[in-house]
Amino acid sequence: MELEKIIEKITQYRNRKGYTYENMAHDLHITPAAYRKIETGETKLTVERLFKIAEILDIKVSDLLNEEKSTIYNQDLKDNAIGHQQIENLHQENKEVYQELLKAKDEQIALLKEMLDKK
């Protein structure tokens, strides 16, 4: 995933939370101008800072990195009404199933090798 897309997602999540550059800068212990440079790409985003930003926004780092298999619906209602937001992320569930399938495949290969060695 391109860095620009990650930064774009950070901006989207920050806006959904109603956070300003100042809020983010305060929590990151940097100046608002320094934070702005992160979102504009003038300053490189470090892995450490990515994790801290995800923590501040109360999201998983994978939410920022995973552009596929994530569908985000956001409805911004006026007059302080509660907005409806649904985030669907099947990646982790699919990853666990995939890992189980790989493990079963490896076990089957080992069994077949064992059977061939006995012949």
Image: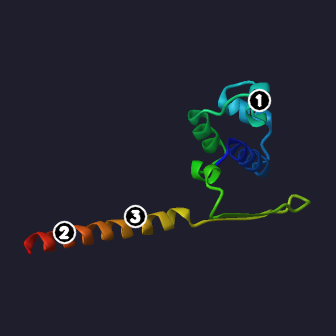
Q: Is residue 91 left or right of residue 41?
A: left
Residue 100: image x %, image y %?
A: 37, 68
How packed mark 1 is, by other alpha carbons closer than 10 Å (few <14, some 14-19, many 20 or more), is: some
Q: Residue at x 21, y 67 (%)?
A: 110
Mark closer to the chain start, 3 or 1: 1
Q: Quadrant of the C terminus?
A: bottom left
Residue that label 1 marks: 37
Secondary structure category for the residue under label 2: helix
Residue that label 2 marks: 113
Secondary structure category for the residue under label 3: helix
> 82 and 84: which one is in front?
84
Residue type, numbered disc 3: Gln
> 94 and 51: which one is in front?
94
Residue 47: image x %, image y %?
A: 57, 36
Figure quadrant of residue 2? top right
User: Is 73 rendered above or below residue 5?
Assistant: below
Residue type, numbered disc 1: Lys
Secondary structure category for the residue under label 1: helix
Residue 66: image x %, image y %?
A: 61, 55
Circle nearer the viewer, 1 or 2? 2
How many numbered circles does the render carry?
Answer: 3
Label 3 vs label 1: CA separation? 39 Å
Q: Residue at x 62, y 64 (%)?
A: 69
Circle nearer the viewer, 3 or 1? 3
Work out which residue is located at the far front of the displayed protein and give it.
119
User: Is 12 rendered above or below residue 108?
Assistant: above
User: Is 116 rendered above or below residue 61?
Assistant: below
Residue that label 3 marks: 99
Label 1 vs label 2: CA separation? 56 Å
Residue 50: image x %, image y %?
A: 61, 39
How packed mark 3 is, by other alpha carbons closer than 10 Å (few <14, some 14-19, many 20 or more), is: few
Q: Is residue 90 left or right of residue 36?
A: left
